[in-house]
Image (spheres, coloured by chain):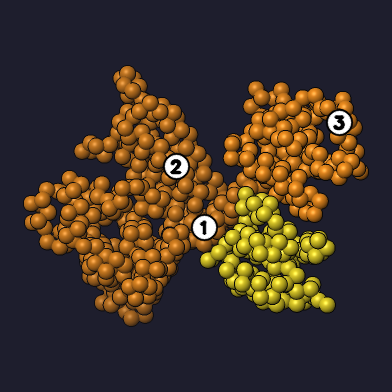
Amino acid sequence: MDAGNPGFFLINLDGTVTPSSALAAHIAIGYGSAPALPEEPPERLPLARAFQLNAEQESQFMKWLELARKRHRDLRWEKLAALAPVQETRISKAGNAASGDEDGHVRLAYRKIEDAAGNLAAIAVFTVDASPGRALARELEAERLRHKLEVRDVLALAANPPETVGAFLVDARTRLDAGRKEWEAWLAERKVAGLPVPGAWGGTAEESPGQRLFRELHMVKGNAGAFGFESLAAGAQECEDFLETLKQPGPGSERAGARLAASLSGLRTQLEELLRAMKLIEGEGQDAMARVLKWKLERLVIGTAVFDLARVEPPLRALLEATRKLTFLSPAYLVRKYRNLVERLADNLGKQVNFRVTSNTGDIHPESFSRVDEAIVHILRNMVDHGIESPAEREALGKGEAEIGFEFVAEEDRVFLRIRDDGRGMDPASIADRGVAMGLVTRSEADSLDEVGKLGLIFLERFTTRSEADMVSGRGLGLALAARCVADRGGNIYVYSRPAEGTRFAIELPHIGQKRLS
Amino acid sequence: MASSVVIVDDSKFQTMQLGRFFSDVMGFQVLATGENGEEAVELYRTHKPDLITMDLTMPKLDGRGALTRILGEFPDAKVLVISAVKGPLLLDCLSIGAKSYIEKPLRFDKEDFVRDFKATIGEILQSS
């Protein structure tokens, strides 16, 4: 709006505006009574220009003026004024245009001006600066969001055992630092060699620094989400997105590179702050005590393995047995984090999932499966996102509430973790077709595979059934990363599935810790 | 004699709320309620109430159509628009001849809302 100084101006019934500067010389305005209309206001602006209206808005404003003229006697003015098409407008701060100040907002108050015969003569408009209110509202909103995220962080810190949260945060920091270091070294090398920075990454046989960084970010994102550190997950996602745009360098690469660097350092700061917050909540001293205690226990437990328990006197045997079990945890406790993850993801996607845990051994060694944490997280994300149908779909199929089951099976020399859902399942033939279409296998290779082999194609990097990446399962990397993680720990991963019945993943690992005593 | 009203709204709940307000607070006689524009026209013909309230977005015949037909047959009809719509359509209805409007949501728990509602009905009844 450029109708002169804010404060007061007139709208004439012909659809023009008389700015206050032009009126100032003619009239004085009192709030008590309607101001008199000057006989010949000297300067008039078209309404559309004064309010920056497009043709449609202008026609609506004219309609309103006509209505006001016609009905101002029998329809209460407040009701008419409330219908004016412009209630609030932006006003450029005179002289401040170059300073980059935001435009101000003004609320408009309309008052009618009648002539001696009681006809509507013009409409006076008073402007009330709404900018401070708006700025305050914006600030409050930002503050509210910050507070919300902080509360989430605190809840995440409180809802998970300090040991696991601490381990995650330290692990995330290590991963991030390592990934970053490699990436930055690579950038520096290219710079020295006179190559464009950043350059294309990915597509090599060995893991490139870009792929490494991407994998670490993906992992940090997944685990952060699992613990409920939403801002951290979002920060990692942001880094992933920048890195993804750098895969094929283009005109905006330099800028994206700078933004990636900034986001990475932001992510690092977030991690440090969470670690600091954790110490505030848990206390450093306690943390240290817990570590000593755990260390002592481990030594004792190692002791139990040295004895030939069959030859130990029963009272001592009971003591050793009890000692060993001190470090064991119930499966329900171990999977708390995964339960949180599933519930949170399901919630985000508007799904309902029942989480069930069973174990054939009662308590288990706490590190039985933490080695393949990465794989578990990816599998669960996939299940909730792709496997489980929406509540409406399930109802139509008569399937009832969805369930994800966790089953721990310990055998003499190996342990199994089975994760199953009762979702839509996968069709081996379709998976094979998809693999062929994506160029991951040839037709004849695909045809030679049995059902389990066909399903196994989902573990190949770049296998995805989606064209768009999303927050939950990313870009089809998840299951490939899961498979790599299990393989790195000397284990195997299997998938079985039946369309409409569900999908089952099995992770087989060498047994950790001691053989069972009984 | 108590003033009379016909209430038309496609939401049964809102019709009920409005009916209660007109009878309990305003002392009106609620002659009938309807759910769409066609019923609005029919009910007006049958009852010739002192006031008819109507929503704008309704099935069969919308509020604007019903308003046009009622005023075509009964130019003195007092029609109060009660709607969440506040744009060009409402301007149109007021130009055609709706006496006034009340903006939804219905907040009978708010003093301001009730005060404005009462004042609006008073103005309509006084108008010729």
| Mark 3 residue crowding within 10 angstroms, few (<14) / some (14–19) / many (20+) | few
**Quadrant location of the C terminus of chain A?**
bottom left
Q: Which residue is drawn at 47% across and 44% down?
A: A235
2 and 3 marks in contact (CB < 8 Å): no
Residues A249 and B27: in front is B27
**Helix, strand or loop status at disc 1:** helix
**Closer to the camera: disc 2 or disc 1?**
2
Residue under circle 2? A238
Residue A378, image x and y in percent? 34, 55
Q: Please report whichever mark, 2 or 3, sits nearer to the chain's N-terminal start.
A: 3
Q: Residue at x 36, y 44 (%)?
A: A216
Q: Residue at x 35, y 42 (%)?
A: A214
**Closer to the camera: disc 2 or disc 3?**
3
Can the viewer see residue A249 in this picture? yes
Image quadrant where residue A69 sits: top right
Q: Is residue A512 left or right of residue A390?
A: left
3 and 1 marks in contact (CB < 8 Å): no
Residue under circle 3? A38
The amino acid beneath tag 1 is Ala
Q: Is residue B89 left or right of residue A271?
A: right
The amino acid beneath tag 3 is Pro
Residue under circle 1? A156
The amino acid beneath tag 2 is Glu
Q: Which residue is drawn at 55% across and 48% down?
A: A276
Alpha-carbon distance for marks 2 and 1?
21 Å
Q: Please report whichever mark, 3 or 1, sits nearer to the chain's N-terminal start.
A: 3
**Quadrant location of the N terminus of chain A?**
top right
Q: In the rendered image of this protein, does residue A288 appear above or below residue B40?
A: above
Question: What hue represents chain A?
Answer: orange
Alpha-carbon distance for marks 2 and 3?
60 Å
Provide the letter of the chain coloured yellow: B
